[in-house]
Amino acid sequence: MDTTTLERFSLNGSEDVVRVRLAVRTWMRANGFTLLQQTKMVTATSEMTRNCVTHGGGGSAELQQLRDGERLGLRLRVADQGPGIADLPLALQGGHSTTGCLGLGLSGSKQLVDDFEITAEPGKGTQVHITQWR
Amino acid sequence: MTTSIPIIAFSELLLVTIQGDVSDEQLEALRAELCERIQVTRAKGVLMDISGLTLVDSYLSRTLVALTTQSRLLGATLVMVGMRPDVALTVVDMGLRLEGVNAVATLEQGQALLRRLALASGQEGGHGHHNT
Ligand SMILES: Nc1ncnc2c1ncn2[C@@H]1O[C@H](COP(=O)(O)OP(=O)(O)OP(=O)(O)O)[C@@H](O)[C@H]1O
Ligand SMILES: [Mg+2]
């Protein structure tokens, strides 16, 4: 599988969340993804980048183009050096938030993309990879 | 860089149009602005056109519920108009519920719904139906 970096972002505030969302939308539209694939990926992107800003104290994101034979994919990697997540299974279950929100960002995003990976060891920050294939 | 989301008053209603990709700040500003406009105009209904809105994530879904509730508390009914099919599918797949949010497909349906609700609650909709 070929991986090409498309763009890097630093994530510090909500305007960065918008920038990454727009980059994802633009690239997917230009590369023939369906509207539904675009909207699902953009929505998951919004959740993961906002979590990075609000829970992780900010961090960075990278967009990658994936090519696997005929298949084309887009991967977003989001990383921060924040507190990590003490009870990851609980956070992924949905309906649990440490900020009094709905707590559907992680569980919901997992349903929207083809591939969802997260590591969030306490003290080692949080790393999320989400991928959508065309 | 923050452009505000427009609120237009017409025939005793407020029309809010949300277009494209909106930031958290724009939505926060809209919440405050809409409260004020409902209070000043005494509008009984708010039509919120989201046919141009390209995503509803958990933050936006919270905002839509908040806008609905705050409008109700101020005496106005908010109706969301024209959610895109891809957005609706995404909202459902995420498990977001948008509880209590009124939704219709077109502005005409929104106006009809608001008229019905006004009649049902015995409110006077003003003198004439069409003031231009
Ligand atoms: N990058 C992160 N760093 C630290 N903790 C995180 C991070 N992302 C998520 N979490 C933790 O996982 C919980 C669940 O995250 P999730 O996105 O599902 O919900 P939320 O952000 O609290 O609310 P919502 O996304 O519905 O607005 C958060 O409340 C937070 O405690
Ligand atoms: Mg979240």
Image (tube, helix red, strand yellow):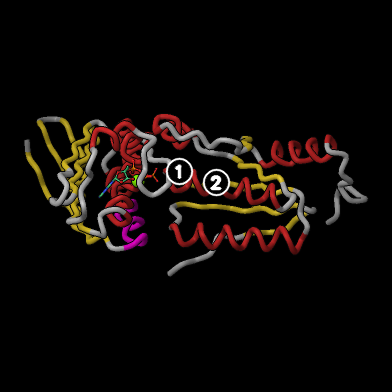
Q: Are marks 1 and 2 in contact (CB under 8 Å)?
A: yes
Do we see residue A117 in this rendering? yes
Residue B96's place in the image compared with B60, above or below, is above
> Residue placed at 61% from the left, 42% from the top?
B80
> Residue placed at 9% from the left, 43% from the top?
A3
Question: For residue A18, what is the image quadrant?
Answer: bottom left
> Residue placed at 17% from the left, 51% from the top?
A125
Type of the residue with mark 1: Val
Whole-percent x, y for residue A87 in the image:
24, 38
Residue A1's place in the image compared with A15, above or below, is above
Q: CA distance from mark 1 to mark 2?
A: 9 Å
Which of the chains bears the disc numbered 2?
A: B
Whole-percent x, y for residue A15 in the image:
36, 62
Quick one: SS at disc 2?
helix
Q: Is residue A122 left or right of residue A93?
A: left
Whole-percent x, y for residue B62 in the image:
49, 46
> Residue placed at 70% from the left, 36% from the top?
B109
Question: For residue B30, what is the image quadrant?
Answer: bottom right
Do we see residue A39 in this rendering? no
Type of the residue with mark 2: Leu
